[in-house]
Image: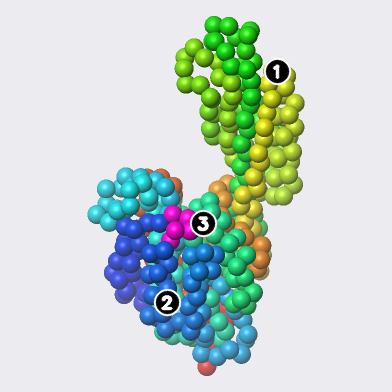
Amino acid sequence: MPTVLQLEEVLPELTAIRRDLHQHPELLFDTHRTSEIVADKLREFGCDEVVTGIGRTGVVGVIKGKIQNSGKVIGLRADMDALPIKEATGLPYASKNAGTMHACGHDGHTTMLLAGAQHLAATRNFDGTAIVIFQPAEEGGGGGREMCADGLMERFGIQEVYGMHNMPGYPVGQFAIKPGAFFASTDEFDITIHGVGGHAARPHDAVDPTVAASHLVIALQSIASRNADPMNPIVVSVTSFETSSTAFNVIPASVRLKGTVRTMDADTRELAERRIREITESLVPGFGATADLLYHHNYPVMANTPTETEFATAVARDVVGTDNVLINAPAIMGGEDFAYMLEERPGAYILCGNGDTAMVHHPKYDFDDRAIPIGASYWVRLIEMRMPFAG
């Protein structure tokens, strides 16, 4: 049985891989170097099949167990891309790519799944097939959607799929999971308000879009406070307010608002979009202005399926003990495009503790390498427990 201690014997090698990936972060689908390293490692490990170019730059490895009597095929997914953030950690292995950083720990996720794949390919103590999935473009590009659209599930016959993400604030050696909706949907809106520009000293000759926009920002907050069920999580945030003028004495001709909507169920998601449209279309004309609204459905709600969540919990307990697995973790209003894979197949997404560091997407975030053997152990035990080999 693989244990954390056995996998810790290769921690220096795994740490070197992770830190090399950290020094060379790549954005969205441009994970060419990372994908090549992953594919080369999988071939080196002796995977039965290594396929590249799925979802543009995704990589998939096939590892067959000692026997195939069960007919089971289980997918394990890690993400590979970085973020457009300037690193501020000052670490010796900090990013060498200016303005780009592994600020979400995808370098660690890739390394954990590589370590798990290496062990599974060497031992093959399971009855069935493990599919290791390395996905690009989780950070806003919808790489999970693209891999599914490329036939990921059908091509490899995947029946269940599992994912994992590190989480600062949880101690290294702890897991957290939640059945049902775990990560929020992440819609976006873009509203341009058109008025009539003019001299700031003569507002009566203009139609000031900044006044209409300011009232709209406040009014949109009524969706969460007065329209949505207070028991259903929802976030409506205006995150950008841009005018067509930068002068002190000019009333701009237009204002552009951009923002995000986060919800945990389909009904609340539909409500938010409908109310944004209704409020915009009714409020803005009251100020003599007009509005153009673009609304984009981004990542859907990521929901763990019950049976697979229970199983993933059992695996985590096997690795770190019952007391180190939080089974009703708080829902997260951030998005996760593993949601697309969970729409295709049953499965579960779990959080792996990353200790006391800056939160993900922060320029001082750092992945704790001590988590690598723990995450790798989880992947190995998941395959061996889901497809036990009785030989």
* Residue stretch in magenta: 27-31
Mark whose residue sits in front, 1 or 3: 1
**Magenta segment includes 28:** yes
Mark whose residue sits in front, 2 or 1: 1
Q: Residue shown at 44%/58% (left/top)?
A: 30
Could you tell me the amino acid type at mark 3? Glu
Q: Earlier in the sequence, mark 2 or mark 1?
A: 2
Could you tell me the amino acid type at mark 2? Leu
**Which residue is nearer to you in this view: 34 or 110?**
34
Task: Give neighbour class at mark 2: few <14, some 14-19, many 20+ (Cα, 10 Å).
Answer: many
Q: Secondary structure at mark 3?
A: loop
Which mark identifies residue 42? 2
**Which residue is nearer to you in this view: 261 or 352?**
261
Q: Is residue 271 above or below residue 360?
A: above
How far from the left and from the top, in percent, is residue 139?
50, 53
Which mark identifies residue 177? none
Is residue 388 at least partly visible in the picture? no
Q: Which residue is mark 3?
A: 138
What kind of secondary structure does the magenta stretch mostly adopt?
Answer: loop
Q: Secondary structure at mark 1?
A: loop
Marks 1 and 3: CB-CB under 8 Å? no
Q: Secondary structure at mark 2?
A: helix
Q: Residue shown at 53%/24% (left/top)?
A: 244
**Which residue is nearer to you in this view: 21 or 165?**
21
Could you tell me the amino acid type at mark 1? Gly
Q: Is residue 281 above or below residue 265?
A: above
Task: Give neighbour class at mark 1: few <14, some 14-19, many 20+ (Cα, 10 Å).
Answer: some
**Which residue is nearer to you in this view: 191 or 69?**
191
In which quadrant of the rendered image does the N terminus lie?
Answer: bottom left
Q: Which residue is mark 1?
A: 288
